[in-house]
Image: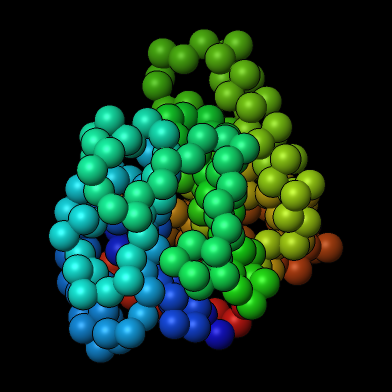
């Protein structure tokens, strides 16, 4: 059983065993992470920053978990912001993989994205697979985008998802961008992912406050043959225990 906590936007904490995986922290209004770490002084903490965008990365992470064994894994574009002086920092581009992070048995592999940065696949010591897509999505939010660019974005998204599914046909927990602002096809990326890989649990993110739509999974048009369990987070600081 993993405990998943919603921080904001694409930010989540996943506690699996004695390891905290902190994805795309940019703010924590309820100070949940600090409280968690105070109550678990022996836990290891691995921070991820999938994108240099301020809604995915906050340098404040280097002031957190000071009394814990910790590591920082970021997209290559983030390195210009953090420099090369921080300890236990790894920068990954698509295709890079690191193993046994902090001696926890955690493997991290980076895949592409349709925006800046990368998507991360984390394999835990007990063999569970977690996908955090970062900005990976089959659409572009710029209203001036021409149809050809939209098609290129969709094609790139499918290429990345296909590569992930080929390497990790079973994904225990997936986080992927869902943005209702783009119109009625906002869940097409999710539908494509769960049809390509056996996703056990799915959590939407990056939905710009449109929680009612993003968490109304009846609108996703997921085929009945898909057995994925869908979990929605409506409030920052909300926790859900998910069986991986």
Q: Is residue 16 left or right of residue 39?
A: right
Q: Quadrant of the N terminus?
A: bottom right
Q: Which colour assignment does the render follow?
A: rainbow
Q: Is residue 87 above or below residue 179?
A: below
Residue 127 place in picture, x, y as percent: 67, 72
Residue 230 place in picture, x, y as percent: 59, 67
| In front of the other: 191 or 221 | 191
Residue that lies at the very extreme toward the bottom in this rendered image: 39
| In front of the other: 112 or 195 | 112
| In front of the other: 25 or 76 | 76
Which residue is at a point 38% across and 74% down the rendered structure image?
Answer: 44
Q: Quadrant of the C terminus?
A: bottom right
Residue 171 place in picture, x, y as percent: 68, 62
Q: Is residue 124 left or right of residue 101?
A: right
Residue 186 visible here? no
Q: Is residue 63 left or right of residue 83?
A: left
Residue 122 place in picture, x, y as percent: 56, 59
Q: Is residue 47 above or below residue 151?
A: below
Q: Quadrant of residue 160?
A: top right
Which residue is at a point 43% across and 30% down the rendered structure image?
Answer: 116
Which residue is at a point 60% across and 82% down the rendered structure image?
Answer: 243
Residue 170 visible here? yes
Which residue is at a point 55% across and 52% down the rendered structure image?
Answer: 98
Q: Is residue 58 left or right of residue 15?
A: left
Total numbered circles: 0
């Amino acid at each position: 059983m993993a405990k998943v906590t919603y921080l904001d936007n694409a930010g989540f904490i996943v506690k699996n065993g004695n390891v905290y995986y902190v994805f795309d922290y940019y703010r924590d209004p309820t100070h949940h992470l600090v409280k968690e770490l105070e109550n678990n002084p022996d836990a290891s903490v691995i921070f991820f920053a999938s994108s240099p965008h301020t809604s995915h990365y906050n340098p404040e992470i280097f002031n957190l978990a000071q009394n814990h064994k910790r590591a920082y894994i970021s997209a290559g574009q983030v390195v210009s912001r953090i420099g090369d002086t921080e300890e236990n920092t790894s920068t990954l581009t698509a295709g890079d993989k690191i193993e046994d992070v902090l001696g926890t048995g955690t493997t991290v592999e980076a895949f592409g994205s349709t925006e800046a940065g990368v998507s991360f696949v984390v394999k835990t010591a007990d063999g569970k697979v977690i996908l955090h897509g970062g900005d990976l999505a089959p659409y572009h939010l710029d209203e001036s985008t021409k149809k050809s660019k939209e098609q290129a974005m969709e094609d790139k998204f499918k290429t990345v998802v296909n590569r992930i599914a080929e390497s990790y046909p079973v994904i225990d927990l997936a986080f992927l961008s869902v943005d209702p602002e783009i119109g009625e096809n906002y869940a097409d990326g999710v539908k494509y992912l769960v049809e390509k890989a056996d996703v056990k649990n799915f959590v939407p993110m990056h939905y710009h406050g449109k929680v009612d739509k993003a968490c109304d999974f009846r609108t996703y048009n997921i085929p009945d043959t898909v057995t994925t369990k869908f979990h929605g987070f409506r409030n920052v600081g909300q926790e859900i225990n998910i069986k991986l």
